[in-house]
Amino acid sequence: MRAHLLGIEGMRVEDIHTLLTNAMTMHEVSERVIKKVPTLRGRTVINLFMEPSTRTRTSFELAGKRLSADVVNISESASSTKKGESLLDTAITLASMSPDILVVRHQASGAPHLLARYLSSTCVVNAGDGTHEHPSQALLDCLTLMRHFGEIPTGKTVAIVGDVAHSRVARSNILALSLLGNKVRLVGPPTLVPSDLAHPRCFGNRVTVHHSLGEGLKGADVVMCLRLQRERMTRFFIPSLEEYARHYGVSEKVLRIHAPEAVVLHPGPMNRGVEIDSDVADGERSLVTLQVQSGLAMRMAILVTLAAIRGAGTSESSEGGAI
Ligand code: ASP
């Protein structure tokens, strides 16, 4: 049996609801004095991170530990890929140790999907693959909004501002938020937010593209700021950081004019003074700290949900995004 979390693409709305409900239970566990539960005792989780990460790696590690799993962390610098081993050989080596869950972050889009095809008895979780998807980030963002609004986010207008073209966070969030029935506005310069993204064949008919910050923010309920993914840019997309910040930087002044009621998300790491100003990041409308807390609860929910499917021996989807 195989069950994976490879992306939001292919997930059903019920899958997202289940994960959000399970994450609320996990959040309640994190509020207890003793935060450890025996749910995954005897299970092994390997975190294979081939790209830098602070929040995602730490929260998957802590999630596994709070659930009493045996957790092993491998980073690029400590893995044999440094000695020329291929990703697949690394994975086959790890698979022969029979981990229950393999959490993978990789610079190549599709790497977790490839691993899922070769690992027959391990659940694979995509913790961010190239410019493709970052499903646990989108799920934790939905959980953050659910905790803030007191209900599963639906019918909201969400403006995603910045480097959409290179952002796996944007892609997963567009899919998740529109699946839940929200309107998604993509805001940024044409080089980073191509107009084609609004074509219904891309992400359906809930997505619009805006090249003016004011127009994109107008009346939004939620503003999600994205970092410029300069490590993934192969050519020049903006004239300079200063020019970009002047036109697309989200500041308290801009929000007061265009989206006075909006709350603000940022997946981190933040580049203050570029895509977001400190008065927003540290201000009252910022949900950034809640996002980090929700990240732990959501990653616990993902591990528990996958382990339950695996334990039950059902044959859920192996190639799609569904849990
Ligand atoms: N932490 C997120 C990611 O891994 C966002 C970012 O790096 O800007 O994609």
Image (spheres, rainbow, N blue to C red):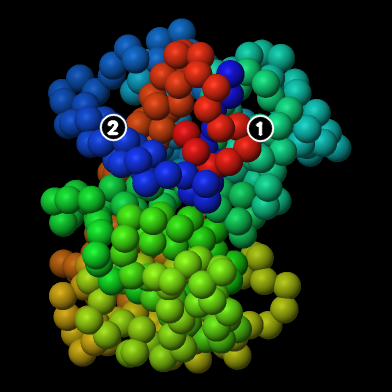
User: Within 8 Å: ligand 1 and the Cβ of disc 2?
Assistant: no
- Numbered badge on residue 98: none
Image position of 287 with respect to 243: above or below:
above
Residue at mark 2: 22
Q: Is residue 229 visible?
A: no
Image position of 22 with respect to 66: above or below:
below
- Numbered badge on residue 116: 1
User: Within 8 Å: ligand 1 and the Cβ of disc 1?
Assistant: no
- Look at 41% across and 33% down and name the residue there: 302
Total marks placed: 2
Image position of 17 with respect to 169: above or below:
above
Percent of width and height locating residue 166: 59, 67
**Viewed as shown, does residue 311 lie left or right of 126?**
left
Image position of 70 with respect to 245: above or below:
above
Residue 6: name its quadrant.
top right
Instruction: Please name the amino acid that badge 2 sits on.
Output: Asn
Separation of residues labelled 2 and 1 (CA atoms): 24 Å
Label 2 secondary element: helix
**Which tag, 2 or 1, sits closer to the chain's start?**
2
Q: Quadrant of the N terminus?
A: top right
Q: Nearer the viewer, residue 281 or 151?
A: 151
Specify few, some or many for label 2: CA neighbours under 10 Å numbering under 14, 14-19, or 20 or more: some
Percent of width and height locating residue 42: 46, 8
Percent of width and height locating residue 300: 36, 30
Instruction: Please name the amino acid that badge 1 sits on.
Output: Ala
- Look at 31% across and 41% down and name the residue there: 17
Specify few, some or many for label 1: CA neighbours under 10 Å numbering under 14, 14-19, or 20 or more: many
Percent of width and height locating residue 132: 60, 56
Q: Residue furthest right?
A: 84
